[in-house]
Image (cartoon, rainbow, N blue to C red):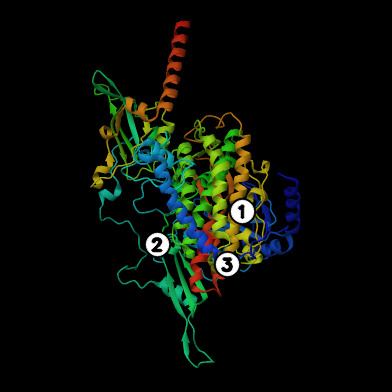
Amino acid sequence: MSNQNIALESDLMYIFPEILFHDERPGYEGYIIKSEHLSSFMQRLRDDLGYDYLSSVTGVDYFPEGFMEVVYHIRKSIGGYPLVIKARLDRENPVIASLVPIYPGAEFQEREAWDLFGIKFEGHPDLRRILMWEGFSGHPLRKDWKEGYYEEEFKPFKSRWPAGHYISHEDKHPLGTNVDYPAGFNPESWIPEPEVALYSGLGRIERKNEETGINTDQVIVNMGPQHPSTHGVFRMAVKLDGETIVGLKPVMGYLHRNHEKIGERNTFLGIMPYTDRLDYFNSMSNNFGYALAIEKLMGITPPERAEYIRVMMAELTRIVNHLALFGFLLNDLGAYFTPFLYAFEERELILDIFEAVSGSRMMCNYHRFGGVARDLPAGILEKISDLVIDRLPRKIDDLDLYITKNEIIRHRSEGVGIITPDQAIAYSAVGPVLRASGVPYDLRRAQPYSIYDRFDFDVAVRYHGDVYDRYLVRLDEMYQSLRILKQVINNIPEGPIQAGKPQYQVRVPAGEAYGCVEGPKGELGFYVISNGKPNPWRYHVRAPSFINLTSLESICIGNKIADVVVILGSIDIVLGETDR
Amino acid sequence: MADQRDNYMYGLGILKGLGLALRHFLETYIDDIRHGSKRYKTPEGIAYRASKDVSGIFTVQYPDEKIPVSEEFRFLPFLIFEEKDGEKEYRCTSCGICAKVCPPQCIWIVRSTDPNTGRPIPDPAEYYIDIDMCMNCGYCAEYCPFDAIKMDHNYELASYTRAKNIYDKGMLGQPLSYYESIRPINYQREESARIEAETQRAIRKTVA
């Protein structure tokens, strides 16, 4: 523990003597707070101690013990490690004060905790389900909740081995009950209350225009879920006054599969390929974050060469992501598909490298606990350095040359979708969205992980906070990634790529860990609780795409309906990660 | 980096953009002339279009042309058998590590038992992989202690019915020579390790 943390610890215990306790369970960190004092404590933490950035909120269900915990990870936007605060609740009646008035960024995360755990947040402005549908029965991340076709609590299932003969449940009951409805619920006669709630939440005002004397009516337009500009199945209910946006509610969960429940049923190693499917553009970064969390629990570090390979892959992924984003963003801006395909050429070349290294272009599944799956094949380093030194700088310069100053792009993106630094921090925005509004916050610098402290690079930052700056930040980041990649290629050592022997059943000691990386979309965190068994007790993903959407409404208000498409494009969401 | 906000292109942006598209278009034809008949449907042509030097056309005319996959490329698993006296001898011992490590649990195995004693013998009676469920992660191949299951390169497996997508032992089986042909480097490494281990064992035996 660093000196700073020790100082902080004594301070916190000194400032809040009666209400704060150390979490003394072995392997756990942080503090437990009496839940009735949460709001006042957080208020002081934010205003007096500088913890202005709420990174993650989630619940944990301790089932046989009969209590629940809400876990908060709070950071300072000037950098440093997160402070972990937990509040303990009664499992039968979990109620706690909402943090939305203090940290608006908690809005969606608290809705998620309500949806998946049934924790009620008092004072939340709009506590509806967010990922599941309103007619859903129960709260699926509670440990006593069982899914349709439930087989066993933990993988590996015994029906596969040694028992052998397995017939899938869907085949046994082709029309069987896959869905549980709440008592008295009839899907045939159901009027979708969430829609009513959604629209009444948006409100609807008729008014008379005083100049013309004409009665005008605000209208609600649903963009999505099958709108091509939403980059997947994502819906925005937009309230319009003429063309101007006066209200917006995102509706998501169409791609929800309860990744976290799948993870809690699975073994530690078995989760790794599932993380590929979160943000399917950046599977290498996802693997990285998850591996860091488990390595923290296990107390191992990968050997040098593996660290270099990881950084190399993470930075290549960043370039892939930003290139793909440029393509999509320009599609949204009306430059239909030509720049997109030019960007995808470079992406293809990088994906060729991923295929040669990991075996798969997109679902890489390359990181292991304490290293990577296999060493770089012969000749691949030369290929990477050809790309990094020769081709990519040239091509990114091309993009810059043709796009950056183009007046159509600039007229459509400058001054559109502005988010101020204060707002960005309050709404827990991460990644390029945060950095484009003038907050130079990058986890690679703010909380260096792996070997990022060795590399020479600048944190890309821009100050206008509009769509154009979010584009420029990503452009700068690609140049910085190339800079890091050059240093990696020059310094990569020979040696082993895995600490210890590769194991398929890792022993993970009991405890909790939060592993996070600066993914291309922002802080991607994995919060894992182990109880010493082969499966995690709690597995939570702090998804940057999801949390960045919290600020969408306030970014969009005052802009025109046509700009929503561009703003959403510039936030850069991937629905695989948003909906999990 | 300087703020670029003050410089506009003043109409040149459109011309520049169109010029870029035109350049790509023309480069394709220049490349066509330069490479002649080697440009399409030849391994050199395809390799060129997947290299860093490519300009002009980038796409490959699937299914007439296919980009060769890299050695580590993984798709579905297959079981390796060695042919001895016309009999297929599977390397699999039905130890079940693949079934245990499989994240979506798409592998299931029925062990053989000795008809006389009723004890399990190291040979799978049945071996199934539901390829609808398989997520191509490669764990089964990575953690198999007997090098008995490996990942295939064949990615074309459309079929007309879903029922055909549960592969049994016969459909999964491939001869060792097939493995050698798709993954020569891995094959060489594993074979030399095996020979090494066997000589070590022989030495130990003679010493004892």
Q: Numbered disc 3: what chain?
A: B
**Structural crowding at the residue carrying mark 1, measured as other residues with C-alpha within 10 Å and reported as few (<14), some (14–19) or many (≥20):** some
**Structural crowding at the residue carrying mark 3, measured as other residues with C-alpha within 10 Å and reported as few (<14), some (14–19) or many (≥20):** few
Q: What x and y, as percent, mark residue A447?
A: 66, 48
Seen from the viewer's position, the closer of residues A64 and A260 is A260
Identity of the amino acid at label 2?
Ser
Q: Are marks 3 and 1 on the same chain?
A: no
Quadrant assignment, res B183: top left
Between disc 3 and disc 1, the foreground one is 3
Taking A514 as reference, is B109 left or right? left
**Structural crowding at the residue carrying mark 2, measured as other residues with C-alpha within 10 Å and reported as few (<14), some (14–19) or many (≥20):** some
Q: CA distance from mark 2 to mark 3?
A: 59 Å
Quadrant assignment, res A101: bottom right
Identity of the amino acid at label 3?
Tyr
Q: Which residue is mark 1?
A: A476
Residue at position x 57%, y 52% in the image: A397
Taking A65 as reference, is A140 left or right? left
Q: What x and y, as percent, mark residue A187?
A: 32, 67
Say if mark 3 contacts mark 1, CB within 8 Å.
no
Seen from the viewer's position, the closer of residues A443 and A134 is A443
